[in-house]
Amino acid sequence: MSKIINQIPNLITFFRLLLSIVFVIFICIYVKTQEYLLTNIIIFLIICFTDFFDGKIARYLKIDSFFGGIFDVIIDLIYIILSYTILCLNNIMLWWFFIIVILKFIEFTITSLILRRRSINASSSLFIFDVIGRITSVAYFIMPGIAIFLNHITSDSLTILNYICIVITILSVISSIQRIICGIRYNQKYFFWNIIWSYNNLKYLYHEHL
């Protein structure tokens, strides 16, 4: 019984993956028919709900783990890639912002691996979060829902979306600068070597926690 309970957060995370696929399917239906908007919104809200609670449940049960943290971020990334791609292809989301999101994820992963070396509480998590970074990650996550809603209520949705994305991008840049500066301060001489080290460390951490 305890083994089943211990898997509840990961099962919720996996359920989000399935919902992400369903969400993309209904986006395609919505684009072609302009129907099922409410269904899309409900699925989107459930996806947000599962993302919010899987980590909280894991911490409440004291079963948060290295694997769970990586699994959660990977599923979030899959959700973002799937939803952003289909929305961009249908001119509902902005391609330039999609590229910003991917670049931010790459920076986030590299700087997390570097900053992890000096974090006291980093043993159970691969990723190191900052306050502004958390805000931007939430923004990345909810943008598909905002894009669909704006597309439904106004013909000028991309213009409005562009302004929103510019603000989020500015916050992303601030977050990235802060994280890179912290990494450089941590080890100025070997910062760029640490980027190479971070790749090797990622492989080691993956095999260590299997």
Image (spheres, rainbow, N blue to C red):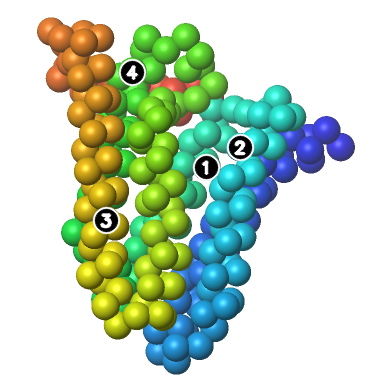
**Marks 3/4: CA–CA distance:** 27 Å
Q: Residue at x 49, y 76 (%)?
A: 25
Position of residue 196 measured from the top left corner of the image (x, y, whole percent)? 21, 23
Q: CA distance from mark 2 to mark 4?
A: 21 Å
Q: Which residue is mark 3?
A: 165
Given the image, on which type of amino acid does mark 2 rest? Gly
Instruction: Kindly report which numbered mark, 2 or 1, lies closer to the viewer in this rendering.
Output: 2
Q: Residue at x 57, y 78 (%)?
A: 38
Write down the residue under mark 2: 55
Q: Residue furthest bottom?
A: 33
Q: Secondary structure at mark 2?
A: helix
The residue lying furthest to the right in this view is: 1
Task: Report which residue position mark 4 lands on.
Answer: 115
Tell me whether the residue at label 2 lies in contact with that at label 1, contact meaning CB atoms closer than 8 angstroms.
yes
Residue 10 quadrant: top right
Left or right of 119? Residue 180 is left
Residue 204's quadrant in the figure? Answer: top left
